[in-house]
Amino acid sequence: MTNKLKVGVIGLGSMGSTHLDIYSKINDIEVIAIADSIQSRLDGSSKAEGNISGQAEGGVLGLSVQKYLDGMDLINNPDIDIVDICVGTDLHFIFVEAALAKNKHVLVEKPLARTYDEAKKIIQLAKKKSSCHVMSAMCLRYWPAWVVLKEAIENNTYGECLSLNFKRQTSFPGGAFYSDESQCGGALLDLHVHDTDFINYCLGLPDAVFSQGYKGPSGGVDHVVTNYIFSKTNASPLVSSEGTWAMQEGYGFNMSYTANFENGTLSYLLDEDETLKLFRAGFEPKSIKLKEGMGYEHEIRAFVDEILSGNKTNFDLLLQAAETIAIIEAEKISIETCSVVALEA
Ligand SMILES: NC(=O)c1ccc[n+]([C@@H]2O[C@H](COP(=O)([O-])OP(=O)(O)OC[C@H]3O[C@@H](n4cnc5c(N)ncnc54)[C@H](O)[C@@H]3O)[C@@H](O)[C@H]2O)c1
């Protein structure tokens, strides 16, 4: 029991509750504290809902741990090894800064920060704290169907990658955080960041982006379509992505991709079911069996393993999560100016 890593979770919305469910399944972890400024979330009498099945199922119910109304008080608890930051995005920077100042390991929900400037400051702080592991919870990197796609791109499993198209569509989540662009960054940052980050993770920083979009209930860009331009490489796939939470109420949530390779097409859709299909000329379409579990589970396991190994193996992934916010900000400028916006490495 004493050798377990001790975790404190700050913010008990859909994500904090989801993380709590996952920690309960990991032997090397013991949650010893939770924090939320809403008393009913802290005592479990109200609970946030997730937007996909498997999110936020149990949450705080049945947890007998220390409880704080202010996340900063949780950070001051000397027994905590890992601070898991699941508050709104505009608060990520101040909580990461405070947790690192107390020499805690930090898991911070995506996006890493509300702005690229804040993300860069987090990188500087994380570099200085050689004993602290910091992870940006970019869960798509660990989502089984996306892991298959990354491997197919890297290993040329079906030949060269010719095109990649990603979609993420839902109706407006509502609530104070998502209704305020200054907190969440609109669907452009909050939702679409998953796909932009995955593209960055697989192919690196694009040379330029061209985006179009419109504003919605957050007050910011809530529907975006982007072309990612990789002009400097010889064999660049055609890359595009659409992210929106502007669909009408009742639409539900879906995420999908279609990836075309020289010798095969991979197509994935998560709505009611989870299916990854492979189409190849001369063969029957085939369903690819996926590793069980959601990306959140594999992501948290990877973070715990990194801490236990003592090696900062995933630091590059943190740098990339920061760069992703630079790409999102370029997409915003592209929408505002209706022009192609270049990115500098
Ligand atoms: N990885 C994913 O797929 C995914 C999905 C949804 C949300 N998120 C991210 O998770 C974060 C939180 O999203 P959410 O939907 O859970 O939001 P939310 O608003 O439902 O929950 C945030 C919680 O933080 C609490 N809080 C705010 N300030 C606090 C403080 N000072 N001390 C303690 N608690 C405080 C709020 O009371 C609230 O309950 C966001 O950054 C969002 O982008 C990630």
Image: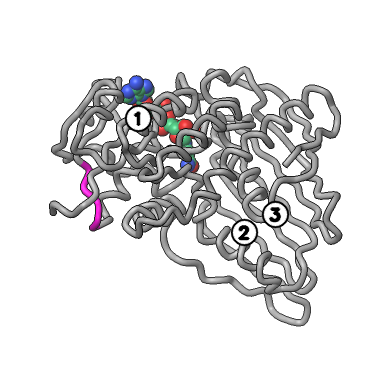
Mark 1: secondary structure: helix
Q: Position of residue 56 (x, y in %)?
A: 35, 41
Residue labelled with disc 1: 101
Tell me the residue at 30%/36% (across/down). 9
Q: Position of residue 40 (x, y in %)?
A: 25, 23
Residue nearer the viewer, 270 or 220: 220
Disc number at residue 300?
none
Is label 2 within 8 A of ligand 1 (CB to nearest ligand atom)? no
Main SS, magenta region, reads strand
Q: Is residue 39 visible?
A: yes
Which is more foreground, mark 2 or mark 1? 1
From the viewer's perspective, tell me whether residue 233 is left or right of residue 70.
Answer: right
| Residue drawn 23% across the image and 38% down it | 80
Q: Outermost residue toward the bottom? A: 282
Marks 3 and 2 in Cβ contact (< 8 Å)? no
**Element type at mark 3:** helix
Residue 7 as seen in the image, left or right of residue 314: left
Three-letter amino acid code at the position of disc 3: Leu
Q: Earlier in the sequence, mark 3 or mark 2?
A: 3
Foreground: disc 3 or disc 2: 3
Give the image quadrant in which the ligand numbered 1 is located. Answer: top left
Q: Say whether residue 148 is left or right of residue 304.
A: right
Residue holding disc 3? 203
| Distance (Cα) linking label 3 and label 1 | 34 Å
- What are the residue bounds of the magenta stretch? 27-31
Marks 2 and 1, how far apart in space? 42 Å
Residue 308 at x, y percent in the picture: 31, 57
Residue at (32% x, 50% y) in the render: 22
Residue 48 in view here: no
Which amino acid type is marked by label 2? Answer: Tyr
- Label 2: which residue? 268
Is 28 within the magenta?
yes
